[in-house]
Every structure is written in C-alpha cells, then in structure tokens.
Image (cartoon, rainbow, N blue to C red):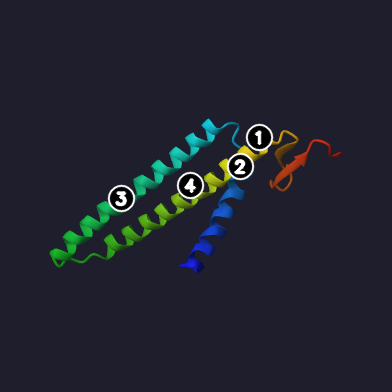
Amino acid sequence: MDKLINSVKLLVDGELIDANKKFPMFSSNHEAYAVLVEEIEEAEYETERIKYYLNNLWMSVKNNSKEYELLKTLKLTAMKAAAENIQIAAMAQKFIDSEAIRENTRVLPTVCSKCKDLIINDESATE
C-alpha cells in the first residue's frame, strides 16, 4: 500500500502543477472551498456510478450472463473516480498553499509566460 500511496502522491503533485499553470492561486478560502466541493461532488458521482455497475454486475452473475463489457465499464468508472479523488487532494494542497501565500503578503504567485511554471516571487526581488 505504501508504494501505491507514493505513486498517488506523484499524481497529486503533477495535478497540482498542472492546475497552478492553468489557474491562479485561490483568492479566498471561500473560493477554495467551492472548488473542493465541486471536485468532491464529481468524485461522489463516479462512486455512485461504480455502485450502479456493481449492482448490474451482481445481476449478471446471478443470471450466469457474460459480464465482460460491464466489467470494462466498472474499471473505467473506478479509474475516473480515482482521478477525481486525485484532483481533490491536489485542490486541498492548493488551498493550503494559497492560504500560506495570502498570509505572507511579500510573496506573490505568478506563472511564467514562457514555460507556464508557477513562480513564487518576492516583492523585494529585482528583474
């Protein structure tokens, strides 16, 4: 399990980097909370779909039916749910990072216009 958690951490870190390239840091805790709620709702939706497909799988098993396509759909839905949960973890970290940046007014986040990497600037730095 530790190896899997470490792999997930890398995926979370990658998702956070991508999100920071596309969107600015959260301007308030209210904004961060709203983004987290949206991601959690999306994860819940995929989880509900997993339960639906699992129920259909059980019906197929009881009827001795072929369930290969259903299993493929279940697998894909589980992967989507995992991806949504990775996004939740990344947005939770972005919430933490955004709050830390807002507490220290000398540090302002920007995105490099050339490489799109997140840059933490010190106001006292010169160009």
The answer to whether residue 84 is left or right of residue 59 is: right
Name the N-terminal-most of marks 4 and 3: 3
Q: Position of residue 61 (x, y in %)?
A: 18, 65
Name the N-terminal-most of marks 2 and 3: 2
The answer to whether residue 75 is left or right of residue 29 is: left
Q: Secondary structure at mark 1?
A: helix
In the drawing, what numbered circle is on residue 102?
A: 1
Report which residue position mark 4 lands on.
Answer: 88
Q: Residue at x 49, y 67 (%)?
A: 2
In the drawing, what numbered circle is on residue 114?
A: none
Q: What amino acid type is highlighted by mark number 3? A: Arg
Q: Secondary structure at mark 3?
A: helix
Residue closest to the far left: 63
Q: Residue at x 48, y 40 (%)?
A: 36
Q: Residue at x 51, y 60 (%)?
A: 8
Q: CA distance from mark 1 to mark 4?
A: 21 Å
Q: Nearer the viewer, residue 59 or 44?
A: 44
Q: Is residue 110 visible?
A: yes
